[in-house]
Amino acid sequence: MHCIGDAHVYLNHVDALREQLTREPRPFPTLTISPEVTDPNPNPNPNPSPNLSPNPNPNLTPTPTPNRNPHPKQVTDPLQCTFADLKIEGYTPHGKIAMKMAV
């Protein structure tokens, strides 16, 4: 889904956009994240409402959520994920279409 709030085309971009419209769409690439990168918060509701008590029914004992991934690496900060943890396949971009900055 894409939403455009203010779309316009400058006169010096018309030829380049016509060229872009002649291009056939290509399949989307796939992004694979290493299985060693795990969810740092396996809790399905990490931000419960502050108005709820931690255990609204004291007769029920919460069951701990098992670690979904047995690998030792856990990313607790998105900045710890490196390019080595990511793999992009099937990316076949079209060539560049030059457009001058419109002022």
Image (tube, rainbow, N blue to C red):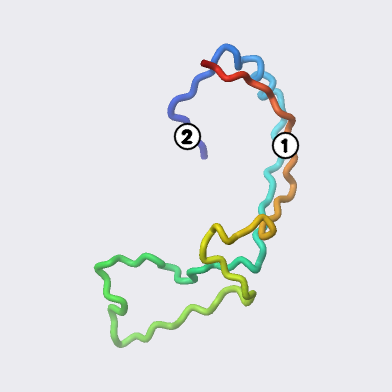
Residue 93's disc number: 1
Whether pointer 1 and pointer 2 mark residues with C-beta atoms closer than 8 Å, the reply is no
Residue 16 left/right relative to 3 = right
Residue 79 vs residue 23, the one in the foreground: 79
Q: Secondary structure at mark 2?
A: loop
At a point 52% along the width and 79% down the height, the residue shown is 66
At a point 63% along the width and 20% down the height, the residue shown is 99
Figure check: 56 above or below 26: below
Residue 56 vs residue 33, the one in the foreground: 33
Figure check: 65 above or below 75: below
Mark 1 vs mark 2: give the one in front. 1
At a point 28% along the width and 78% down the height, the residue shown is 56
- Dot 1, how many residues are within 10 Å of its Cα: few (below 14), some (14-19), or many (20+)? few
- Tell me how far mark 1 sits from mark 2, CA to CA: 23 Å
Figure check: 89 above or below 75: above
- Residue furthest top in the image: 11
Q: Tag 2: residue type? A: Cys
* Residue 102 in which image quadrant: top right
Percent across and percent down for residue 39 are 54, 67
Percent across and percent down for residue 100 are 61, 18
Q: Secondary structure at mark 1?
A: loop
Q: How many numbered discs sit on the rendered protein?
A: 2
Residue 48's disc number: none
Figure check: 91 above or below 22: below
Mark found first going from the N terminus, 1 or 2: 2
* Residue 10 in which image quadrant: top right
Percent across and percent down for residue 78 are 54, 59
Q: Which residue is mark 2?
A: 3
* Residue 19 in which image quadrant: top right
Q: Tag 1: residue type? A: Pro
